[in-house]
Image (cartoon, grey):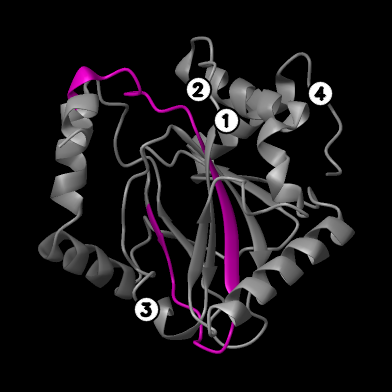
Amino acid sequence: MNFINRDPSGTMAAALAAQINANGYAVIDDYVDPDLLCAAQAFVADAITANNGEYIGFTGTEQLGGTFLASLPKDPNFVSLCRRIYESEVGKPAPESGFYQVLRCLSGRGVQKHSMRFHFDSYVLTALIPIAVPEHGNPGRLIIHPNTRGLRRTYLGNLLDKVLVDNRVSQALLNAAYRRGSRRMIRLSLKPRSLYFFWGYRSLHTNEPCDADAIRATALLHYADPHADSRVKRALRRH
């Protein structure tokens, strides 16, 4: 990665947090070295080919060896930056936790199924790196309805929000607002090599579909689950 400034004073992190609050997202251009990006793009293309041209997703880093995505969650500069962005917004020390990482590779018939489904993340901060963006047809823009809710005090409050969103009626209303051109929704064209941040927990978001013969791949690194210690959450997941 080209980002080498350790930002010891936290000035950059504070500025990025302020940009997220003001604009719905923040971006660092040219974050990923071109050669590293090419290797990740080749990995994605091979994975989709092996899956008969269809959508495939990877959780964690175990299968990402040979790409920069395998080491990024432990890169000290990246980790420090995410922690400081969190602290600038939340106003308390960042948790000693890792990232929940997902690589989403859209292509083929599965594009529609994995697009235009608005949701809240379970983690405060979402970092997104576009690996591949279609150069023709629909580019699969990121759609953000920024800072829609605050941090819920309890896991049940968070769960209620998700239930109210994850149903046919709410999804239909949100998609209708998108089609009407709602000014509250940001339509963000992504650039490979750039690093984007937004408050995934607080912001409703989704992605537009790309064409079936194209590839849209994004790496998502989620940081800081505010309900990680919830007994209710642990109990529900056991059932």
Residue 215 horizontal side relative to residue 153, left or right: right
Is residue 183 at all visible to an observer of this figure? yes
Using a 10 Å C-alpha cutoff, classify the residue at mark 3 as few (fewer than 14 neighbours), some (14 to 19) or many (20 or more): some
Q: Which numbered disc flags the more N-terminal residue, 1 or 2?
A: 1
Say whether residue 120 is magenta: no
On the image, numbered disc 4 is attached to which residue?
A: 6
Is residue 28 at all visible to an observer of this figure? no
Query: Which of 229 and 28 lies nearest the eye of the viewer?
Result: 229
Q: Residue at x 50, y 79 (%)?
A: 210
Up-down relation of residue 126 to residue 209 (above or below):
above
On the image, numbered disc 1 is attached to which residue?
A: 17
Q: Check disc 3 and give the amino acid type.
A: Gln
Q: Check disc 2 and give the amino acid type.
A: Glu
Q: Check disc 4 and give the amino acid type.
A: Arg
Using a 10 Å C-alpha cutoff, classify the residue at mark 2 as few (fewer than 14 neighbours), some (14 to 19) or many (20 or more): some
Region of the chain picked out in magenta, as a range: 205-232
Residue 73 horizontal side relative to residue 159, left or right: right
Q: Residue at x 36, y 37 (%)?
A: 122
Say whether residue 209 is magenta: yes
